[in-house]
Image (cartoon, rainbow, N blue to C red):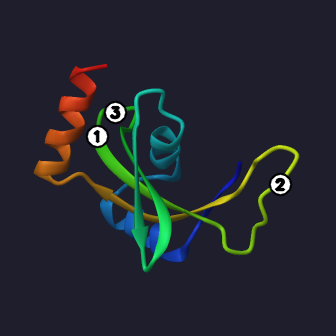
Amino acid sequence: MGYYWTQKARTMAAALGLTPADVTDVLYSAAKLVITGTDQSKPVLLFFARTSTGRPVIVTLRPDDEDELDDDTGIVDYLIRSVYDMKAYELGIFTDWENNQ
């Protein structure tokens, strides 16, 4: 599975002072809460996790429309659609989840 940035996500991360490494921390975190949703009627995954410095961040992914699911491996690539700091209520949900792991 590969992750590819949209320009919007790059801009969002940069505006927040988040580096690509910070986003990678979230994507590969062992302690992440993954919630499914939709964006413009397309499926998305929201990854709630912390960067290596402990900053709570949400990364939104959507399957790459150009990508075909590999029947042999089941692998699909994802577009990083947005990156943002958790709001207070999101942090509450995530903290409750963390405390119950």
**Closer to the camera, 18 or 5?**
5
Horizontal and vertical percent position of residue 56:
28, 42
Which residue is under mark 3?
53
Of 20 and 4, which appears nearest the observer? 4
Q: Where 19 falls versus 63 (above or below)?
A: above
Q: Quadrant of the C terminus?
A: top left
Q: Earlier in the sequence, mark 2 or mark 1?
A: 1
Q: Which sits in the foreground, 39 or 57?
A: 39
In the rendered image, residue 60, in percent from the top left (x then y), is placed at 44, 59
The residue carrying pointer 3 sits among few (fewer than 14), some (14 to 19) or many (20 or more) residues within 10 Å by Cα, namely few
Query: Do tag 3 and tag 1 residues touch (Cβ < 8 Å)?
Result: yes
Residue type at mark 3: give it.
Answer: Thr
In this rendered view, identify the residue nearer to me: 43 or 62.
Answer: 43
Q: Secondary structure at mark 2?
A: loop
Q: CA distance from mark 3 to mark 1?
A: 6 Å
Q: Position of residue 39 (x, y in %)?
A: 42, 73
Residue 83 makes an appearance in the image:
yes
* Residue topped by disc 1: 55
Instruction: Locate residue 95 relative to residue 68 in the image: left or right.
Output: left
Name the mark nearer the viewer: 2 or 3: 2
Q: Quick one: SS at disc 1?
A: loop
Quadrant of residue 17 within the rendered picture: bottom left
Q: CA distance from mark 2 to mark 3?
A: 35 Å
Query: Which residue occupies 30% across, 33% down?
Result: 54
Quickly name the residue at label 2: 70
| Circle on res. 46 | none
The amino acid pointed to by label 2 is Asp
| Distance from the alpha carbon under mark 2 to that under mark 1 | 34 Å
Occupied quadrant, residue 4: bottom right
Where residue 6 sits in the image (x, y, percent)? 56, 72
- The amino acid type of the residue labelled 1 equals Arg
